[in-house]
């Protein structure tokens, strides 16, 4: 084998081993299809599990969160977490803030077409600066930023 070909093969071997190892190390969630349109997802680090069911309007039982429900859940949890980080960094809190999310499905193709998000904050007399920090941080949530631009997102902040 010529030296260049040998080097390329060696490099490819180590490169593939490195990325295979990285994928193994970075596994976050393991999901198993249980049948009957139900899955069980396990958070690998903690061992916590959750079940999903297809919704009734899509041939399922609707006995648990649907995958698209988890999208809305992820959005709300992410927003609360990012706002909580921002509040902590600026020495105030948003404890007991609630988010209500309405997920509206669209068709052709079937997808989440719109989310309406209502954030209700406890009566703590937030300053205008704190309100701006809260609102700006909500829009920087990684889940929010990962959503497709065609998904309609309407947010209402109630202080």
Image (cartoon, rainbow, N blue to C red):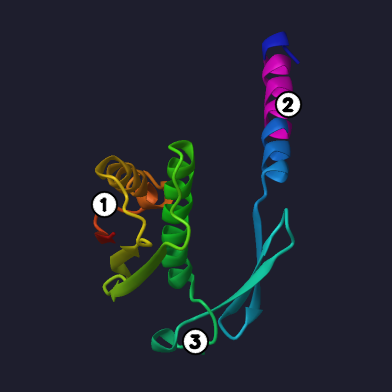
Magenta residues, start to end: 5-17
Q: CA distance from mark 2 to mark 1?
A: 38 Å
Q: What is the quadrant of residue 153 in the picture?
A: bottom left
Q: Residue at x 68, y 27 (%)?
A: 15
Q: CA distance from mark 1 to mark 3?
A: 28 Å
Q: Position of residue 61 (x, y in %)?
A: 51, 90
Q: How many marks?
A: 3
Secondary structure under badge 1? Answer: loop
Structural crowding at the residue carrying mark 2, measured as other residues with C-alpha within 10 Å and reported as few (<14), some (14–19) or many (≥20)? few
Q: Which mark is residue 149?
A: 1
Q: Which mark is residue 14?
A: 2
Image height of 88 relative to 113, above or below: above
Q: Compare marks 1 and 3 and give the one earlier in the sequence.
A: 3
Residue at image mark 3: 62
- The residue sitting at the front extreme is 125
Q: Compare marks 2 and 3 and give the one earlier in the sequence.
A: 2
In the image, which is nearer the foreground, mark 2 or mark 3?
3
In the image, which is nearer the foreground, mark 2 or mark 1?
1
Secondary structure under badge 2? Answer: helix
Q: Which mark is residue 6?
A: none
Q: Position of residue 86 (x, y in %)?
A: 43, 41
Q: Position of residue 64 (x, y in %)?
A: 54, 81
Q: CA distance from mark 2 to mark 3?
A: 46 Å
Q: Compare marks 2 and 1 and give the one earlier in the sequence.
A: 2
């Amino acid at each position: 084998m010529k030296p260049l070909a040998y080097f390329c093969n060696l490099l490819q071997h180590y490169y593939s081993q490195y990325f295979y190892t990285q994928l193994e190390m970075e596994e976050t969630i393991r999901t198993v299809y249980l049948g009957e349109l139900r899955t069980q997802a396990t958070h690998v680090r903690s061992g916590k599990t959750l079940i999903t069911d297809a919704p009734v309007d899509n041939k399922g039982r609707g006995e648990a969160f649907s995958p698209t429900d988890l999208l809305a859940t992820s959005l709300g949890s992410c927003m609360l977490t990012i706002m909580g980080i921002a509040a902590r960094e600026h020495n105030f809190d948003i404890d007991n803030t609630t988010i209500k999310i309405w997920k509206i499905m669209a068709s052709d193709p079937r997808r989440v077409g719109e989310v309406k998000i209502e954030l209700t904050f406890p009566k703590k007399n937030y300053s205008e600066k704190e309100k701006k920090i809260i609102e700006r941080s909500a829009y920087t949530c990684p889940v929010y930023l990962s959503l497709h631009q065609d998904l309609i997102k309407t947010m209402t902040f109630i202080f």
